[in-house]
Amino acid sequence: MKEEVMDITRATNTVTAMTDKTKKISSRDLDPHYTDKRFDNPQTIFLDPGFETEERFRADVVKGAEYVYSDRLVQWHSIDKCNQALANAKAVEGEESTPKLYETYLQILMDKPNLRLIHIISGVNVGNGYPYRVYGYIQEEE
């Protein structure tokens, strides 16, 4: 019976986006499997309250936000620097897999203490089947 419910959920092709930065995001949503039909198109898995998305290029984006792909961060910095920034963010935030953790991670990695994470998109690369994330952020005034 549980499998049937899971199949029905996958068939809906939607993900319920979180709005609380302190709540964990499921690994199913953070790192979707290529067989998960919900991610045939990129899905919003976190959206900060007070922001709205608009559709652009098969994905929903927040107007005025800057976006960076998770794989680009590794290309621009290095896997070692990314891993160290994530370890430092975990030491600060304690909780894993939360939008707040990823906000702190980006602040440390990109050296932008005023960065505010407002949107996370998750998807699967159709070319290779690997999951990816896109982080949407703004810079807040000091």
Image (cartoon, rainbow, N blue to C red):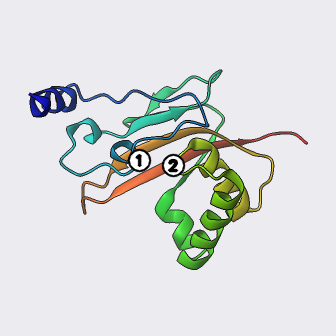
In the image, taking residue 134 as reference, residue 6 lies left or right, namely left
Quadrant containing the C terminus in the rendered view? top right
Residue at 62 percent across and 23 percent down: it is: 49
The quarter of the image holding the N terminus is top left
Residue at the image position 38 percent from the left and 48 percent from the top: 27
Residue that numbered label 2 is attached to: 97
Classify 10 Å Cα crowding around label 1: few (below 14), some (14-19), many (20 and above): many
Q: Secondary structure at mark 1?
A: helix
The residue under the point 64% across, 38% down is 65
Identify which amino acid the numbered label 1 is placed on.
Answer: Leu
Q: Position of residue 71 (x, y in %)?
A: 47, 64
Depth check, front residue: 106 or 53: 106
Residue in front for this viewpoint, 140 or 59: 140
Residue drawn at x 30%, y 28% is 14
When asked about the image quadrant of residue 37, the answer is: top left
For marks 1 and 2, the one nearer the N-term is: 1
Tell me: 26 left or right of 116: left
Residue 18 in view: yes
Mark 2 residue element = loop
Which quadrant holds residue 48? top right
| Neighbourhood count class around disc 2 (C-alpha, 10 Å): few under 14, some 14–19, many 20 upward | some
Q: Which mark is residue 30?
A: 1
Residue 85 in the figure: left or right of residue 13: right
Please tell me whether mark 1 or mark 2 is closer to you in this view.
2
For the residue pair 93 and 142, the one nearer the viewer reads as 93
Query: Dots 1 and 2: beta carbons under 8 Å?
Result: yes
Q: Position of residue 124 (x, y in %)?
A: 31, 51
Is 106 on the left-hand or right-hand side of 119?
A: right
What is the x, y in percent for residue 66? 63, 45
Residue type marked 2: Ser
Q: CA distance from mark 1 to mark 2?
A: 8 Å
